[in-house]
Amino acid sequence: MNHSPKKLMAGMLAIVLMFTLLVGCSGGNNNTPAENKGNTGEKGNGGNSGNGGNAAEGEVYPENGLSKTEKITIKWGYWENGYGRAWMDHAVEKFTEKYPNVTFDITSSPVIRDLISTKMAAKNDDDMFDIISPSFNGDEGTIAQKAGLFEDMSDLWERDVPDAPGLKLKDAVLDNTMEYAQKIDGKFYQIPMGAYALGLFYDKAFFKEKGWNENPKNYDEFLALMETIKNDGIAPITYPGVYATYINFAFLIKQFELADKAGNIEQYTKDFRQGINMYSAPEVKEYWTRMYEMGKKGYFVEGAAALNHTQSQMQLLQHKAALASTGDWVENEMKDAIPEGFEWGFMAIPFVDVTQNKVWVENGIGAGSLMIWKNKPENVKKWAKEFALFLMTNDIQAVNGENGISPIRKDFAENEANLAKLQAAPKAVLEYVKNNNGQFATGVRDVAFASPDAAKATKMIEELIIEVTAGKKDPLPVLEEADKLMKKVLESEK
Amino acid sequence: METNKRTFIDVIWRLIMFLCALSVIFPLLWIVLESLKTNKEFFANVWALPDKLMFENYKKAWDSYHLGSTLLNTLYYVGTSLALGTFLTALSAYVLTRLEFRGRKFIWGTIMLSLFLPGINALVPQYILMRDLGLTNSLTGLIILDSFGESVFFLMLLGGFMQSLPKEMEESAYIDGASLFQVFTRIILPLSTPGIVTVAIFKFLGLYNAFLGPFIYLSDSSKYTIGVAMYHANQIMQYKADWVTLFAGVTIAMIPTIIIYVFFQKQIAEGATLGGLKG
Amino acid sequence: MAQIGASVPATPKKVSTLSKRKVQTTIFILLALGPSYCGYLLFTLYPNILSAYYSLLEWNGITDPKFVWFDNYKYLFQDEYVWRALGHNLILMVTVPILTIIPSIFLAYLLNVKGYKESPLYKVIYFLPNVLAVIVIALMWSFIYDGSNGLLNAILNLFGIDNNDFYWLGSKKTAIWALLPPLIWGGVGFYVVIFMNAMKSIPPSLYEAAILDGASHMTRLRKITIPLINPIVRISTLFLVLGVFKGFEIMLIMTNGGPAGSTEVIGLYMFNMAFGKSSHNYGYASAIGMFLFVVLVIAKLLIDRLSSKDHAEF
């Protein structure tokens, strides 16, 4: 009798352990989803109706050959960011109106990345969203694309855009789109559906009132502007130090400007995209040095380190700072708080003389573009692609434009009514580029490094920003240190 | 004790106590005040009074954070976890503090381990486990996760209280032939009410305010609880400048907790003890 | 030796029913403790054991994990960010418990001993921050510290101090200290209640003798109250120390570790390694977690050692 409880206890523990082991094993099985890739396809929709081409005439949509009757649900993990969710709600409404057999199951969150990462690490395809967007961007997205977790969407370039039969997508988009869009090993895992531009935004009305130079033509004029603003008791530049990389929106692209002036742009762009000399190129050192000089003169707002995006942009709206380093979504982001009489203006920092050389402005394409999870039923993926294509119609692009996403269709501007709908901040960018010999370019790299050393270098540089803009730390030694780490990383990748 | 002798030092003590109370009340009132402004008023001067009380903010918060459905989800999630979890905690506390048996020390030791586990690093394995058990994307799954478990904090809170109970009633019940379960339900539970209420309140607060678990485990936003809604409302402020609606939402979210607290504050004042679970 | 059985029937009078009782007891213990304890083993302990295994992997959550033995640990010891973060934890570990417990004891003593007519109301108010979500606390304090329109600067201005819109969370010198008030503010009320209850259980006769001897409040607090509630103080200290080591939500929301890493604590570093904005490293995050586990156990042993006048274990 004395022993039975002990045995029972032991038995219970054994059962628990067995249970946990079983769970552990099943977890282990799921770690290799590649083996049942094919199965998930059929499992998802109960029957092989995936190829709509077999269905009878009249039961398929003529434009894409997909079945009209088959019910499809697309699970969408949506990142709710500065563009809000109005454009997404609108696009979904229009799409499901046109294709009533398709429904969307949307999980919308400002922190959707945390959820996506967890699901990705858990390696269960059924549990994953069918599409995720806007771009699961940054290094993590690049690594995931490289690992082949997403559907190759390159074929969409050859498709006709739905509202202009005969016009291929690759010809419908703005020039250079394909060149600038991120591709991994030559494949497109996301098709850009909108564009954005980055730089310094300001209030034209305020500048006029103060009599400040709205269009400095060279670096000296720019510095003079900074000095004037500072002497007027206003902080020249604000940026969100909690997410310090926002300052890059004004500075990162300047290395291209310098390389371009030196006549070295082609090789420079190649190296940049491959992550070569990330921290050691003279052009990189130069822009950091200039940032440091500006920091020492007190041209960045004090206490920037405590600000998040909206707080920093608030300083702009409240005229506590003259310029804010951000993107052209700023207007949409701040729409609840923009005071009357505020007029959006834009400038880039001229590192060169804009009357002789091009002034570079960072833009990007890919705002809002979606990616499709690879291990999903074929017909869900097909409909997801249809949806991606649908986002390129001018009606959708116009509504997106109202919500701060710059349209990417070439023929969009042919319609005056379309243009009028654009928000003022993106318009200000276009105006600046037109008047100042501007050159758009992207700061996206084609590679990403996941090793601890690379992460350490990134962290080092991010923390450096605050110190440099406060004029407290010479960036060059830190750049050198980060460069050493990256050399090690590149070496080990070989 | 000699109470009513008031000296100069009392004035200082009372002032200190008043300032402490003020530091609690003032920021809370400030949130309520801001929730009744327009965004422009808020940004123009956070300390000025609003021209007109904007009760519309509350309607907007209610709609845009889907507080109606989230509160219903919260009611189910918190209510069930609370009833089940508190009962189980009371049982555990009773067994571990008032019964002597072989293996008790070992069990208590393994539970103590959890105090030192950092937690966050186990989120991914825990997610995988939950998914394999089919418990993700379900409020019931979340209830199971939150109800079946041990917490050193709650065991100490309740165990400490139970240990202070006199043993005589229990003993006489045994002599009358009552079973352990009867002793537990008829004697221990009623006597421990303040302690149990205190544990329940803390569980309530933890569950009500929890956001990371519900967010990770519930991918369907129609199942979100108020904690997730508030987390999102706060995070979205990185991309929006609609602070007054956030303040209104926060105020709505605070109301149930404050009501429940005020309602049960007597029991907390009595039941909050950190007891020595002697191992 | 009967190991099993209620401690209660200390003198077994009815020997015949004793063995039956033992079986009953055993079944009761299994049923009562089983579900929650198994849940604990499954949902808490098992994922942590798995995490210990993860700590031997190089794994970003995307590509296939690579088994690297103790590389993560080797890296950890050379990672100055880990040590810097631990340094910040150390600052908080010393300050937060002291600044929480001492005021709590004082307020509890005042509330218990001095029957001011407003005392009952204060009891209710002091506890109030404990019912608030961390998010609300962080949000509130962010606005208190705001440079251009924060409460703190507004108060300083009232006293004629113009600090030029100083951002308390924006300076490396002040940021970590500025985190102390929210951390303490959120916790004092709970410990006030805990200490009040502990003080109530001290027999009044002990005080009466001291009062006769003419001992002041200070003396009574020092000589009678504090020694008698010492076990509770120790448990509270332990909870606070562990809480400070593990917690990072306030920093995540208020500063995200900045400026320039000056408020980055180890929990936040680990969190960002596993869930941050840039690429992830679950293996390394797990290694930090395991390392933290060891640090916490050592901290516990140290607290025991430093304060073990009596042998009350917990």
Image: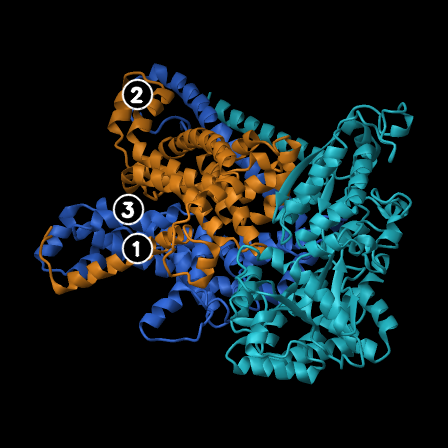
Chain colours: A cyan, B orange, C blue
Does dot 1 land on a helix, a strand or a loop? helix
User: What residue is disc 2 on?
Assistant: B174
Does dot 2 land on a helix, a strand or a loop? helix
In the image, residue C50 above or below residue A316: above
Q: From this viewpoint, which residue is outermost toward the front?
A: A416
Q: Are marks 2 and 3 on the same chain?
A: no
**Could you tell me which quadrant the C terminus of chain B lies in?**
top left
User: What residue is disc 3 on?
Assistant: C124
- In the rendered structure, find residue C104 and report the number of the disc placed on it: 1
Can residue C180 be seen here? The reply is yes
Distance from Cα at disc 2 to Cα at disc 1:
41 Å
Say if mark 2 contacts mark 3, CB within 8 Å: no
User: Residue at the location (57% across, 69% down)?
Assistant: C260
**Mark 3: few, some, or many residues within 10 Å (few <14, many ≥20)?**
some
For disc 3, the chain is: C
Q: In screen coordinates, is C17 left or right of C273?
A: left
Where is residue A82 drawn, in percent x and y?
A: 62, 54
Can residue A279 be seen here? The reply is no
Where is residue A137 drawn, in percent x and y?
A: 72, 54
Q: In screen coordinates, is C161 left or right of B5?
A: right
Query: Which is more foreground, mark 2 or mark 1?
Result: 1
Distance from Cα at disc 2 to Cα at disc 3:
40 Å
Where is residue A488 drawn, in percent x and y?
A: 77, 68
Q: Amino acid at mark 3?
A: Val
